[in-house]
């Protein structure tokens, strides 16, 4: 089926950035939040590789992950043009879409505190005109047309095709013209390792300094669930006041992460498609039901709360499924489902579960570290040692039936989990064109 | 909203036709103008930047008087004109009119620029500059050889089978040229680049011959020798249309493969390969850039390269030409470049001339009278002429400086009085191009902003104030009305019935004299009527060899790094760099260094370092670039020293071997770490 598409010819683009300027003039965007960007492969000019560019904005994918994952339903598709439209008034600024999109199309605007993105110049194309970026390209590298796109239209190094059917045709570099043969008597062979060292660092979208609130929040979800479940099974008392304080803190932590706090209610509008909606919904349900349980003493509220808690744990892990992991492993020792059960076993003092979880976490942790090391990625051995100690020492003390209470042991356990969870964020990232192109060089 | 046809009047090959959208006297959009076949897809990012430039809050909108270093107060036009006329009267009475320097550069093209010269002529004359900062060596070399500077229409390039970009980087400096290059490549043409840098244009090339800068002449002669020895030359063309081939053949004898390989620092096999490509192609367009001729040997270098097109018969055919400068649209000039740059070519009131290449040195040296008053328009000599510190000294030595500009620059910062300059949307004028062949109208689309007055109006008011004869004013300076300006322009159009303001308001136009493929008639306006490889005139006028030759550049051993200062896609000389739309991509000046050179100096990517030589110093952020030759460093042209580093802090003022061009490029520097402790 034919659809509106960008057509990008890699042979023609010289990275003049006119498309970026054309877009920002047409749409009145801030220079710090360009909807279109030109990404360059081999910026440092490695002699054996071509330097080439992708000018990319939103590709208006058929299976748009931004739209699917937005918890607030702030994306819609314009049926007539196929444009994926972001609605500013509906956006809560959670930036989850910026994680979901592999083309770095949704941009968070720090001034307006919400996301914005290319709208395909929907008014222009509805009028039969070309998008402003296409109009602005002085060499015809960026074009627009109605195409029946096939998979091979997107096969070019550095461009991710995740099967979401982006509306773009990429014309790859002609084979024979891809890298100039360089004649220079004085050129020297350079160790590829050196070149890797020289490469400028790509920006990390998920970075610990930005996501520390999420570290604490996700640990809090696991902790509150464990506490509630332990209370339900009468392992540990639970009072309304401390529970409420912790709950409010947890909610405050999430709210720090979103741009429009007054629109937080929109978080749960997309239960059908977004794990983030499901996470917030199930966690809110968990908090509410636990509150009712504590006030009324009705066990059915407690059971319902536990179910919601389990759903919340699963949702949290599912929320992060769309991130890239540096280790490429399926399971992570910092997954909150594991941590939730682990905390529960601790609080309940259920040895068999506790031992299983400690073993499982230790194995997953070590497996990950080994695979990071194999990939030459920094893996912080000293921190790892501390994390492993935090896993085993409390258990050893517990096993020796050390007289001290949980009040001493649990904080140690928590420190270990926080390290693990923090590493989870540090080792996660989002696919971006910048990173993809960096890797092709 | 209204849409107008206009054209970009910058000192740039492309000279794009554009359509400008105007609403409520504001420029709101720039669109392509497909009727210009050379720029059918529209302008580059700088063209789009006019939306910001026309509406920028940083624009100078009122006359400003200096009250302290870097501090200016708004004054009225009345006061400004009063001050200027008092100073000028004093100058004229005490030291004579030649104590005034009238300095105008290439900031905005247009026929109305001639009003400035008219004014100063009426004033009794002024000291002016001869020569040019840009391209005269190559122009003169071409003129001596072919008789005229013209080449095939830009769109003919797609017919070439071999394209040689010799020191030109159109991907950044003439972006629309990449359209026919790509079309030719799609049809199977080969693209070759000769450049000391791995440029964006070289990315799609088959080969990059990354030679030592300044040695291009030797490479050309080495290739010529190979062509001749392998009999890859066009005997018929040579015998019919070329003068001096036998002598040339003798000349290239000494440029053996071994010697040239050693001089240019590329392998012998590479030279053979390049020669065989050139020798086996029946349609070669050879496109030299302007940077390569801004050396002391620039004219001779260009003659050497041009000889390759000549002996292979690649002149005056579809897809084949020497693509240096195309002055076909300069139909209104009595005297074309480069001859108009030579001293003595103008009205006797401008007999007092100093070298534009040695502006600082000459200004400091000149006496009887010394220059007391400096008037600068359309230019930013403090950043664009060589040896900034010398020029600054010379400017400060004068008593009074007036600078006309749209924005604050290195030069306005030296001014006692700044006058606001019009922008391209505020007065109608006719412009040409040195690449595309169109005559174009740069159309007035809005009233001048603030209290801006076009230069012709400033001159008109000054002429009145100074009490020039009414009849002389009328004859030389148009009244400040749109009608008078159009009448002034119609005066030029009179002789060209095919051109009219009416039509030019709608679209670019071609003059009747336009030739799509010049020299196809094999008429060469030289003394002999033939292409002159051997030129007596070259020796007579410039004292260089009658034959093209490679003249090695002066060697120095004091500094380690050769500074290359190419033009950037982000600016036209020092224009546009102040705009946010540009700054987002190039927020400051960077010094590009090969990472191995940086590591030897223990410097890291992104580190701020000091660059210096005998003339200047600056602090600049270092950036790795593996596409450089070792010991070459790059700082792009057009950065201004008041914002950090600028290349001309380091260049020396000297002229090219011919044409009175400026030899910026044999510049050497060192870099050292900045001690932050």
Image (tube, coloured by chain):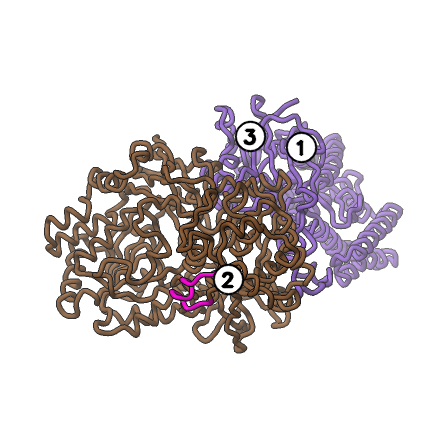
| Element type where label 2 sits in the image | helix
Measured Cα–Cα span from mark 1 to mark 3: 17 Å
Check contact, mark 3 vs mark 2: CB within 8 A.
no
Please name the residue that numbered disc 3 is placed on: A85
Measured Cα–Cα span from mark 3 to mark 2: 57 Å
Task: Look at the picture and state if B149 lies above or below B3.
Answer: below
Q: Colour of chain A?
A: purple
What is the crowding at mark 2: few (fewer than 14 residues within 10 Å), some, or many (at least 20)? many
Q: Nearer the viewer, mark 1 or mark 3?
A: 3
Q: Is residue B540 magenta?
A: yes
B134 lies left or right of A43: left
Along the line of sight, the residue nearer the viewer: B176 or B181: B181
Measured Cα–Cα span from mark 2 to mark 1: 67 Å
Q: Nearer the viewer, mark 3 or mark 2?
A: 2
What is the crowding at mark 1: few (fewer than 14 residues within 10 Å), some, or many (at least 20)? many
Q: Residue at x 18, y 44 (%)?
A: B479
Q: Colour of chain B?
A: brown
- Residue B205: percent from left, percent from top: 62, 49
- Residue B232: percent from left, percent from top: 63, 52
Dot 1 or dot 3, earlier in sequence: 3
The numbered disc on residue B301 is 2
Task: Look at the picture and state if A120 lies above or below B309.
Answer: above
A242 lies left or right of A337: left
Q: Nearer the viewer, mark 2 or mark 1?
A: 2
- Residue B589: percent from left, percent from top: 49, 60
| Element type where label 1 sits in the image | loop
Q: Which residues are magenta?
A: B534-545
């Amino acid at each position: 089926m034919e659809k509106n598409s960008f057509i990008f010819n890699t042979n023609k683009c010289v990275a003049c950035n006119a498309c970026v300027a054309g877009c920002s003039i047409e749409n009145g965007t801030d220079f710090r939040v360009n909807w279109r960007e030109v990404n360059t492969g081999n910026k440092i000019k490695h002699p054996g590789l071509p330097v080439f560019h992708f000018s990319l904005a939103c590709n208006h994918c058929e299976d748009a992950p931004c739209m699917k994952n937005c918890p607030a339903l702030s994306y819609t598709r314009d049926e007539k043009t196929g444009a994926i439209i972001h609605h500013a008034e509906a956006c809560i600024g959670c930036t989850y879409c910026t994680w979901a999109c592999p083309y770095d199309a949704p941009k968070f605007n720090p001034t307006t505190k919400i996301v914005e993105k290319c709208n395909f110049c929907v008014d222009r194309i509805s009028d039969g005109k070309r998008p402003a970026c296409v109009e602005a390209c002085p060499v015809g590298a960026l074009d627009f047309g109605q195409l029946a796109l096939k998979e091979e239209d997107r096969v070019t190094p550095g461009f991710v095709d995740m099967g979401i059917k982006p509306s773009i045709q990429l014309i790859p570099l002609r084979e024979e013209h891809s890298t100039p043969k360089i004649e220079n008597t004085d050129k020297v062979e350079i160790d590829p390792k050196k070149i890797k060292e020289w490469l400028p660092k790509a920006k990390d979208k998920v970075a610990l300094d930005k996501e520390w609130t999420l570290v604490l929040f996700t640990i809090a979800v696991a902790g509150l669930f464990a506490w509630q479940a332990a209370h339900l099974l009468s392992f540990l008392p639970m009072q309304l006041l401390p529970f409420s304080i912790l709950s409010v803190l947890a909610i405050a932590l999430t709210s720090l992460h979103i741009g429009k706090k007054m629109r937080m209610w929109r978080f749960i509008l997309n239960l059908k498609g977004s794990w983030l909606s499901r996470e917030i919904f199930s966690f809110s349900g968990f908090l509410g039901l636990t509150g009712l349980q504590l006030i009324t003493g009705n066990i059915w509220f407690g059971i319902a709360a536990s179910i919601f808690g389990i759903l919340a744990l699963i949702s949290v892990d599912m929320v992060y499924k769309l991130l890239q992991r540096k280790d490429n492993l399926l399971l992570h020792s910092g997954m909150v489902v594991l941590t939730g059960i682990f905390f529960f076993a601790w609080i309940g003092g259920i040895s068999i579960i506790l031992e299983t979880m400690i073993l499982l976490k230790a194995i997953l942790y070590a497996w990950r570290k080994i695979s990071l090391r194999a990939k030459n990625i920094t893996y912080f051995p000293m921190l790892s040692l501390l994390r492993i100690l935090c896993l085993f020492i409390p258990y050893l003390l517990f096993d020796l039936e050390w007289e001290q209470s949980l009040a001493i042991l649990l904080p140690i356990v928590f420190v270990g989990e926080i390290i693990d969870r923090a590493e989870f964020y540090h080792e996660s990232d989002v696919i971006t064109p910048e990173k993809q192109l960096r890797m092709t060089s | 909203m209204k849409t107008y046809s206009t054209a970009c009047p910058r000192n740039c090959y492309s000279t794009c036709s554009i359509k400008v959208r105007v609403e409520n006297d504001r420029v709101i959009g720039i669109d392509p103008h497909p009727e210009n076949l050379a720029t059918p897809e529209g302008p580059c990012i700088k063209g789009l930047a006019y939306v910001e430039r026309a509406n920028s809050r940083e624009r100078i909108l009122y006359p400003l008087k200096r009250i302290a270093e870097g501090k200016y107060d708004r004054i009225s036009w009345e006061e400004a004109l009063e001050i200027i006329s008092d100073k000028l009267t004093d100058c004229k009475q005490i030291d004579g009119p030649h104590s005034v320097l009238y300095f105008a550069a290439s900031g905005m093209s247009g026929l109305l620029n001639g009003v400035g010269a008219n004014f100063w002529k009426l004033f009794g004359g002024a000291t002016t500059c001869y020569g040019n900062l840009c391209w005269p060596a190559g122009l003169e070399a071409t003129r001596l050889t072919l008789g005229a500077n013209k080449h095939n229409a830009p769109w003919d390039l797609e017919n070439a089978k071999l394209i040689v970009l010799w020191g030109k980087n159109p991907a950044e400096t003439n972006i629309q040229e990449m359209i026919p290059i790509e079309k030719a490549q799609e049809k199977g043409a080969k693209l070759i680049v000769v450049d000391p840098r791995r440029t964006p244009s070289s990315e799609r090339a088959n080969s990059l011959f990354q030679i030592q800068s300044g040695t291009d002449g030797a490479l050309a002669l080495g290739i010529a020798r190979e062509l001749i020895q392998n009999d890859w030359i066009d005997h018929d063309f040579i015998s019919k249309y070329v003068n001096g081939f036998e002598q040339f053949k003798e000349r290239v004898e000494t440029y053996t493969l071994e010697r040239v390989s050693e001089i240019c620092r590329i392998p012998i096999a590479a030279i053979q390969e390049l020669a065989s490509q050139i020798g086996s192609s029946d349609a070669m367009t050879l496109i030299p850039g302007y940077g390569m001729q801004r050396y002391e040997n620039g004219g001779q270098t260009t003659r050497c390269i041009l000889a390759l097109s000549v002996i292979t018969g690649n002149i005056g055919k579809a897809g084949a030409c020497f693509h240096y400068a195309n002055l076909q649209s300069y139909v209104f000039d009595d005297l074309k470049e480069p001859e108009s740059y030579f001293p003595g070519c103008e009205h006797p009131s401008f007999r007092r001339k100093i070298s534009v290449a040695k502006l600082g040195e000459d200004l400091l040296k000149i006496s009887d009278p010394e220059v007391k008053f400096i008037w600068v328009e359309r230019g930013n000599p403090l950043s664009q002429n060589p040896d900034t510190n010398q020029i600054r000294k010379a400017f400060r030595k004068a008593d009074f400086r007036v600078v006309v500009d749209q924005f604050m620059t290195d030069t306005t910062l030296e001014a006692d009085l700044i006058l606001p300059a019009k922008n391209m949307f505020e007065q109608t004028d006719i412009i040409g191009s040195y690449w595309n062949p169109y005559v174009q109208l740069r159309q007035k689309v809005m009233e001048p902003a603030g209290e801006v007055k076009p230069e012709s109006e400033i001159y008109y008011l000054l002429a009145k104030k100074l009490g020039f004869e009414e009849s002389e004013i009328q004859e030389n300076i148009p009244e400040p009305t749109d009608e008078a300006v159009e009448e002034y322009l119609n005066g030029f159009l009179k002789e060209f019935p095919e051109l009219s303001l009416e039509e030019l308001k709608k679209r670019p136009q071609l003059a009747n004299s336009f030739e799509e493929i010049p020299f196809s008639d094999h008429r060469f306006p030289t003394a002999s009527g033939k292409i002159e490889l051997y030129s007596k005139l070259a020796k007579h006028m410039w004292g260089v060899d009658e034959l093209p030759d490679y003249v090695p550049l002066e060697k120095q051993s004091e500094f380690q790094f050769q500074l290359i200062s190419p033009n950037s896609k982000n600016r036209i000389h020092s224009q546009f760099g102040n705009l946010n739309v540009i700054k987002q991509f190039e927020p400051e000046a960077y010094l590009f260094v090969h990472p191995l050179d940086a590591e030897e100096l223990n410097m890291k990517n992104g580190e701020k370092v000091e660059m210096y030589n005998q003339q200047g110093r600056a602090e600049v952020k270092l950036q790795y670039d593996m596409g450089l030759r070792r010991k070459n460093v790059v700082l792009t042209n057009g950065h201004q020293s008041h914002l950090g580093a600028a290349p001309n802090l380091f260049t020396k003022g000297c002229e090219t071997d011919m044409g009175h061009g400026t030899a910026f490029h044999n510049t050497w520097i060192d870099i050292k770490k900045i001690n932050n402790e």
